[in-house]
Image: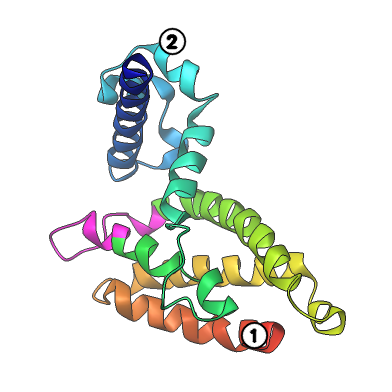
């Protein structure tokens, strides 16, 4: 038992170092120019250790995004409706971005955001599609078929990335403000579909 616990801690520490290394590198140069060699050097781990955990830098990035989008699955009093359950990722994700800089400016050069935001879009769309399928099972068939699940997931994920891009143009806004704008854009559609 203790041996397993130590192994789990080592895995967690290695992955944390790799995610931290990638996160720091994307603030210095475009994602497409980053190579695995730089990530492992920054994380101070061996090449074989990297590949024991991830296939490539894209898998590392996607896992990091998934982890940021994942919110504690325990029920919360504020998740009173399907829309709140579906959008519970947004404020924690935005607050993470806000906390990753301390000087009042967003940490990412807008010219370097496109590749990262494509990964956010893809990962978020897949997560939302799964959650939407679960939520729509609770509705009468006629209401559940109003908007195809794939289109609704793409709409919410696309609007989130659109909002992220807008935030890069308006960096003085707080994470809470940005979340409010994002929710104002998607809540009417989700509310009408989910009958919240």
Query: Are there few (<14), some (14-19), or many (20+) residues within 10 Å of tag 1?
Result: some
Q: Is residue 37 above or below residue 84?
A: above
Query: Are there few (<14), some (14-19), or many (20+) residues within 10 Å of tag 2?
Result: few
In the image as oriented, which residue stretches furthest toward the left? 103
Residue 177 in the image, given as x and y percentages of width and height: 32, 80
What type of secondary structure mainly makes up the magenta span? Answer: loop
37 drawn magenta: no
First along the sequence among labels 1 and 2:
2
Q: In which quarter of the view is residue 121 placed?
A: bottom right
- Label drawn at residue 189: 1
The residue lying at 27 percent from left, 77 percent from top is 173
Residue 126 in the image, given as x and y percentages of width and height: 65, 54
Give, as a single range, the part of the protein colored magenta.
Answer: 96-111
| 63 vs 144, nearest the viewer | 144
| 132 vs 171, nearest the viewer | 132
| Screen quadrant of the C terminus | bottom right
Q: Is residue 127 above or below residue 28?
A: below
Tell me if 120 is positioned left or right of 48 in this view.
right
Tell me if 157 is positioned left or right of 175 in this view.
right
Residue 189 in the image, given as x and y percentages of width and height: 64, 85
The residue lying at 53 percent from left, 34 percent from top is 59
The residue that label 2 is drawn on is 48
Residue 11 in the image, given as x and y percentages of width and height: 37, 24
Q: In which quarter of the view is residue 71 placed?
A: bottom left
| 174 vs 105, nearest the viewer | 174
In the image as oriented, which residue stretches furthest toward the front? 1
């Amino acid at each position: 038992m203790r041996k397993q616990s130590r192994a789990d801690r080592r895995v967690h520490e290695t992955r944390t170092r790799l995610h931290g290394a990638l996160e720091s590198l994307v603030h210095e140069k475009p994602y497409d120019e980053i190579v695995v060699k730089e990530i492992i050097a920054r994380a101070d781990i061996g090449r074989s250790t990297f590949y024991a955990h991830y296939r490539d830098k894209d898998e590392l990035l996607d896992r990091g995004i998934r982890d940021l989008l994942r919110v504690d699955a325990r029920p919360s009093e504020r998740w009173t409706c399907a829309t709140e359950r579906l959008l519970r990722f947004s404020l924690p994700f935005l607050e993470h971005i806000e906390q990753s800089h301390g000087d009042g400016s967003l940490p990412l050069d807008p010219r370097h955001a496109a590749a990262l935001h494509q990964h956010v879009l893809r990962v978020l769309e897949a997560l939302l599609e799964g959650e939407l399928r679960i939520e729509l099972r609770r509705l009468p068939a006629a209401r559940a078929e109003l908007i195809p699940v794939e289109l609704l997931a793409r709409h919410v994920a696309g609007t989130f990335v659109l909002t992220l891009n807008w935030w890069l143009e308006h960096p003085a806004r707080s994470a809470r403000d940005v979340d409010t704008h994002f929710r104002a854009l998607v809540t009417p559609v989700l509310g009408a579909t989910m009958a919240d």
